[in-house]
Image (spheres, helix red, strand yellow):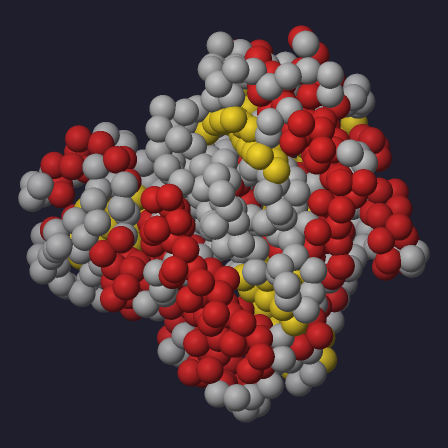
Amino acid sequence: MKLTGRILFLADDPALVNSQLQGENLAWAGQPLHYGVNTDLMISGAACTLGYTPAVLGPWFLENFKEVVRKDSVQSGGFQVIVGGDAYGSGSSREVAVVAHEGAGIELVVARSFQRIFQENMVYGGMPFTTDFSVIDRLQGGEEVDTRKFFEDLPDFFRAVAEGGGLLEYGKRLLAGEVQPTYDVAVPARPLNAVEKIIARKTWVGGTDHGIAAVAPGHQVLCRTGFRGVHEYTAGMVVSLYREAFGAAPMVEPDLIAAFEDHFVLIDEPTVPDNVKKARLAPAKQLTAEMVDACEEYGIRLHGPGRPFKPGVCHRLVVEDYARPGDVIVLTDSHTPTAGVMNAFAFGVGSTAMAFAFRTGLIPVTVPKVVRIVVSGDPKGVLSPKDLILHIIGDPYFREEHWRSSPTDTCVIQLGGPALDHWSVDELSVLTNMTVEGGLMTGVVEPCKPIVDFVKARRGVDCTADLVHPDEGATYERVIEVNLDDVPLTVATPGDSRNRASLSDMTDVAIHNVVIASCTGGSLADLRAAADVLRGRKIGPGVRVTVTPSSFDVAAAAEKEGLLALFKDLGAVVSPPGCGSCIGNGPGIPLPGETTASTTNRNFDRRMGSAGPVFLVSPAVAAASAVTGKLTDPRSL
């Protein structure tokens, strides 16, 4: 490419962003760049309801970034290259974030580092990217840069895909028997950690066979999948890609595929602002209809209100009904790591990767570095997994990605230690769910009693023999020991889940809106924790509270225990199960001037559907804050 357009630097200073939108070409001098330009900023949850093509999404690219970017201002500004800081592409697995770049005219992305899902989506979609900032000077100097050469720096599998026309074209050749593994399948055995062991057991070796002796960080392999899933935001795009590449060919193991109507089911609830319903409801219904039609066409099981299978947030339902120890699990959603609580390797992927997985039964995996976290101590009845994971991902080691040594590195945390037995699978799933918020691929819980107890209670079987244990002598990028006695009640301050702060330093923050919901904050354990604080107390004047159970079974159990009645009697809005509040598609959307305390997992700017600061907290802290109208330690009540 030759620079015929402009370069947009996503500076940390909104004035510098605005000046570029007004026509000024920034003289690059190393100004600070925005940390963690996330996929919600690239293309909002509202815009995602409109469709998934470049023409539809291009005008909405970066809308409201720094509160200065307006609809169509990037596209109409003639920008050809975009430059970001560290952790570019944080957040959702939405492949439409890459599509929005294309629709806005972006031909090259330059950033200090890229987040794993977004980087994969660029590779599979053919979007050139680099971490080499010298390309900026070369382009501005008039040099014609061969962006295809950036693919030469990629690992073998990525390079084969990028140079071969994309992942789906690669899939066609694979199905035709024209390609063999790009990696060595005859490798010597060595001690493996739990993550490596799962990947090695599922690694494709050609034909219908899988399983090799060992894998190592940085290797790229194809793994046999277990459960695969989509929801309304992604199903239409996945099936459109599938149909174009594979036609009416059947999907592999359809009994291990499901679609979930969960992200849009709460948009029409009474307390959702009218402007949100007006903007989102009609296009959301269209995307839902596409998903329903696809399920009928390809024989995919469908979860949702009034559907053949029970409703709930997809991640919660996967843990309840589908996830098995030792499986590789993928959904087109970044919070797929929730299922890692089941001693599984679970991670989010984009739409192209899912179309590939539906037809081949395989999924590409860059073998991650593994950080083992050994947890000891006693939570003393108040410290929650939410506090622990906010404490972990806010540590500079993870926030600044000290584990990274190359642009395509990935990292996983493997969680073990005696303290895990203090919590249930409900509670432990918060740890794995939020690994992605720390820029990690996923989290995997080592074998422990809560997993065995959960599977026996839910499914009536003993899974002990299926659990994947790490080997003695396994290699880790780092081993971190965490004593719960040293972990304070922790919050994430607005803008990013990695913005760690001790609750004790935040108790002067006024709270007007409390949300107890989502795949990471709406389990039965979460509702019980909130109810224990609220029982016998009142919600403070001027405070709104929304409670959303995460699944049908959670709602039924909470109803039976009297929890939902308690919330309703206190004046809280209690909604049916769904995924709405987290992404601005349901009750709990902040109103003008409100500050929110939320048990959800992501607090990006405008993520919850409107402007206004959002603090991430545990269910107990959320409930205590609802009582006092400010961030509050429940022990102080």
- 294 to the left or right of 33: right
Which quadrant is home to the N terminus? bottom left
Residue 292 visible (yes or no): yes
The residue positioned 68% from the left and 69% from the top of the image is: 308
> Which is more toward the observer, 368 or 449?
449
> Which is more toward the observer, 93 or 622?
622
128 versus 375 height, above or below: below
Image x and y of residue 182, in percent: 55, 74
The residue positioned 62% from the left and 75% from the top of the image is: 300
> Which is more toward the observer, 250 or 302?
302
Residue 503 visible (yes or no): no
Image x and y of residue 178, in percent: 53, 89
Image x and y of residue 36, in percent: 39, 40
Which quadrant is home to the C terminus? top right
Counting every numbered tag in the picture gives: 0
> Which is more toward the observer, 412 or 308?
308
The residue positioned 82% from the left and 51% from the top of the image is: 469
